[in-house]
Image: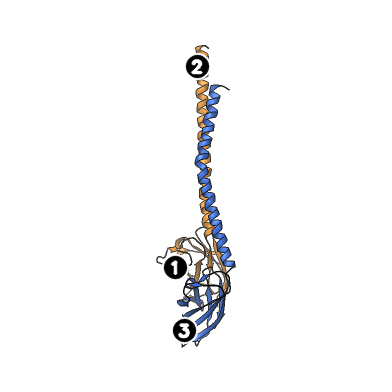
Amino acid sequence: MGFATSITVAIIFMAIIIMATISFPIMIQSYENVQESRDDKHEIQMDQLNTAIDITNITAIGDDILWIYVTNEGTTMLHANECNVLVDGIITNYSANPSGFWSPQNYAVFAVLAETDDDHIIKITTEQGISDIHTY
Amino acid sequence: MGAETSSTHLIFFIVAMIIAAGVAGMMYTNVNAVVNSTQSASSTLSNQLKTDITIINDPGNIPESSNVYTFYVKNTGKSTLTTELVSVLINGVYIDDIHVNKTVIGGGTTTIWRTSEVLKLDVTCASMPSDNNLRVITENGVDDFLEFTIN
């Protein structure tokens, strides 16, 4: 192999080494980003599958307050302050007890302002998007 | 070795260097393009995987006032979204942004839509049959679908 061929092979070899050195960390970073996101997706789906709520009772307090008793029937810890309460299809402000962690097999009480003389459709949705609906 | 032979060898050597440098340059350009595309595609896929939305309306009880229908969409994923890039289709027809008012309930700004927050969509629609469907699509193509009735 002549000198020119040797130098040519060396140039191409060096170029391949430099390209691999530059590309490898970026490819690994991209792969790790996707893997982390796959873990997040898996976690979202696991939480949704492990979440279930049941509106067990609705009680009128006075003329304009409803207490909605909701049981956490799933196996995930929920957050009552991240739920949403729809009264007759409209999102309504509420106060919840407990307002923070809401553990499995325990109930939370959601208090909403609503005319207690009228019929209502109540829908409660958790932070994972799992919901239950009940009529009053 | 005569001067002619030396010159010929020198010319061949220079040409070989030029060809080698050209090949290395082309390889670098192509590899760089592939790496950049991989980075961009992984970023898109990553955002899609982390995004999840849920339409939380009561399908039989859609709030309506003067042809303005209200829909609630909850961010149930792990990524922060931009409300300006949310698209709404009712019965397969794209509703232009001038007919959709987007508000994040309890959000500090109307454009940033964080995890667990609810986006309120006030859609102006002149006439709607009793049975309808709604599709809400986020900036990265993740969507949710709801069939609902208008009483």
Q: Position of residue A133 (x, y in %)?
A: 56, 77
Chain letter for blue, please. A
Q: Which residue is mark 3?
A: A65
Instruction: Work out which quarter of the rendered image holds the C terminus of chain B and state it.
Output: bottom right
Q: Position of residue A33 (x, y in %)?
A: 52, 52
Numbered disc 3: secondary structure: strand
Residue under the image location 51 percent in, 24 percent down: B15
Q: Which residue is mark 1?
A: B104
Marks 3 and 2 on same chain:
no
Chain letter of the residue carrying label 2: B
Type of amino acid at the residue the image marks with label 1: Val
Numbered disc 1: secondary structure: strand
Of the numbered discs 1 and 2, the one sitting upstream in the chain is: 2
- As measured in the structure, the alpha-carbon distance from the residue carrying label 3 to the one carrying label 1 is 26 Å
Numbered disc 2: secondary structure: helix
> Furthest residue to the left?
B108
Type of amino acid at the residue the image marks with label 2: Ser
- As measured in the structure, the alpha-carbon distance from the residue carrying label 3 to the one carrying label 2 is 101 Å
Q: Let me know if residue B60 appears in the view.
A: no
Q: Position of residue B31 (x, y in %)?
A: 53, 40
Q: Name the one closer to the observer, B40 or B70.
A: B40
Q: Name the one closer to the observer, A78 or A66.
A: A78
In the depicted structure, whether residue B110 falls above or below residue A64: above
Residue under the image location 55 percent in, 82 percent down: A57
Type of amino acid at the residue the image marks with label 3: Ile
Colour assignment, chain B: orange
Chain letter of the residue carrying label 3: A
Q: Position of residue B18 (x, y in %)?
A: 50, 27
Residue under the image location 50 percent in, 68 percent down: B73
Asked if the residue under mark 2 is in contact with the one under mark 3, i.e. CB atoms within 8 Å, the reply is no
- Which of the labelled discs sits on residue B7, or is there none? 2
